[in-house]
Amino acid sequence: MALKNLISFYLHTTHQHQQTIGQQGIGFLPMKNGNYFLKYEWEIISTLYSPNHLQIVSIMKKGILAFLLGVLIIGSSLATELYPAISSYQADRGALARKYNNPLSEESFLRFTKLYNDWIDALNKMPYDAYSLDGKMDWQLFKNHLEKELFFHGLAYEDFKQVSHVVDFKDNLEKFYQVRRMAVKPQSQELAATFSLTEKAIIAKWEAMKKSKPFDSWQKAELAAETVEALRKSTEEAYNFYYDYDPDFTWWMKKPMESMNEVLKAYAAFLKDHFENTVVKDDGSGIIGKPVGKLAIEKELAYNMIPYTAEELLKEGEKQYAWCEAEMLKASEELGYGKDWKAALEHVKNTYVPAGEWPQMVAEMADEAIEFLESRDLLTIPDMAKETWRTTMMSAERQKVSPFFLGGETIIISYPTSTMTHEEKMMSMRGNNPHFSRATVQHELIPGHHLQQFMNQRHFPHRRVFNTPFWVEGWTLYWEFNLWDKNFPRNAEDRVGMLFWRMHRAARIVFSLNYHLGKWTPQQCIDYLVDAVGHERANAEAEVRRSFEGRYGPLYQLAYMIGGLQVYGLRQEMVEGGQMTEKEFHDYFITQNYTPIELLRARMKGDIPKDFTSTWRFLD
């Protein structure tokens, strides 16, 4: 495995320096699984395995070497025909982002528009019909990604153009930081005079903006302020490049830069508040998000290959919630609370354990989930994946945003600290009781996010650029469905715990769509989670804050259950349809890396036409 990882790293770095599009003389060596090695890749592999070039090989017996090489060739899920192109694109994008370090500038917007269009043109010239199925899937993934990036980049550019007049004094500052990239020595006395004139222009613009009509939304006002701040930071970066290294520059420029820098900061602060309160910025919850609107929602759905409208998904969320509520009533009656399922929920919340005992119980739950999967032969779990997960505790401050587990290779455990108030401690303990948590420890570790990340580093790693929440959270939520079907909950308390989270996922569809469609405020979302799901209020506030102020896209919250339903439907089709065993389905799915699930369905079925479009009505 270490040797294969070394080869993967070497190939990845080598590809970043290859000009693959339009290059003549590149050939492909087919492998038994339908993937390909480029001829020069084969030469690299041969070199790496050569005892003359890699000392470790010299101590291997020829039989072991042949076996390892055979495994690599037959079982590789690293290289497809699109691997070099996708790697080159990622390198191009990173290089341009570093070069054009002011993202809110005409220069940057135009350069990235060209990048996406150039790669779309190159992609359309590639020999699609000659590719393997994995190559065709990469082509579709790449095309979808580029078109999505170009579309939302275009929206951002249009937004920028509506506020760019706030920096109409920018020309000399832009010229300064652009010339600095090539380390051109400035004429410092002339530059000092230019900065002094620019400062006067900034002040004049500021005075004019005070008399102008305010922006019609706080979002535009913030973008205007960010545009000024981005210009200021790029100018400051260029200034710091010369300052103290060039004595002449330092002598002339110190005071002009200090003065202009303070004016730019104050001007940006003014712009941030220069708006009419036509759209509520803070409804009293203290949560400041940015609803994206119907167009962006439905474009996001299309690029994630979800052929449903926002309204249809809202109805599905309500339908899933109703199922959860019916099952919750059954568990409530079994616990002796009749139709009062919220009383049953209170009973389960109060099963919390004392502080200090909780982390060990979390580790035991993780081992229990692994044993459950392996004893039923549901999934191949590498020993290294079982060995390398670990635990850490979440800070009190972070729990204000993430009141429950976060996970991956490390599961981050929420529980009270001495700095919390008594009320905060109780909400943390009650919200992280054993029956709630038994449903989510496996979601974060195995078979959930830890196993996903482990596999993504080892299978088709170039696909990580195509990140989609429907694959990420859909897989983990699917396992909550599957474990429910397989009687993972041991008793009524466990069922209440699993149903609480399932109800929460359904509620996420409802509150996130209503918010981004402009129908609900953050406070309404908080109240909904408290009233409909039974969240502790502080935990509900943290969930909504995480949803709208974090780094999550607008579809992330609904992707849990909608993605889970996609995976569940695909499993029914492939497993119950007799095309794969359940273990084969799970093993195949988890090794495909980030992929819209409908495209993965087409790959499983063995047919990916070039004009592939999303049509799978999996909810029907």
Image (tube, rainbow, N blue to C red):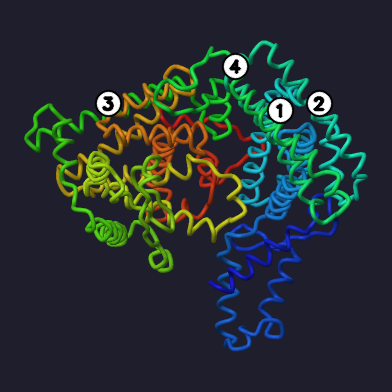
**For mark 2, what is the residue?**
200
Q: Are marks 1 and 3 in contact (CB under 8 Å)?
A: no
Q: Is residue 485 visible?
A: no
Figure disc tally: 4
Image quarter for residue 349?
Answer: top left
> Of the residues tagged 3 and 4, which is closer to the observer?
4
**For mark 1, what is the residue?**
157
Q: Choose the circle earlier in sequence order: 2 or 3.
A: 2
Query: Crowdedness of circle 2 by 10 Å Cα count: few (<14), some, many (20+)?
Result: some
**For mark 4, what is the residue?**
275
Q: Are marks 2 and 3 in contact (CB under 8 Å)?
A: no
The CA span between labels 2 and 4 is 24 Å
Image quarter for residue 293?
Answer: top right
Residue at the outermost left position: 336
The CA span between labels 2 and 1 is 28 Å
**For mark 3, what is the residue?**
532
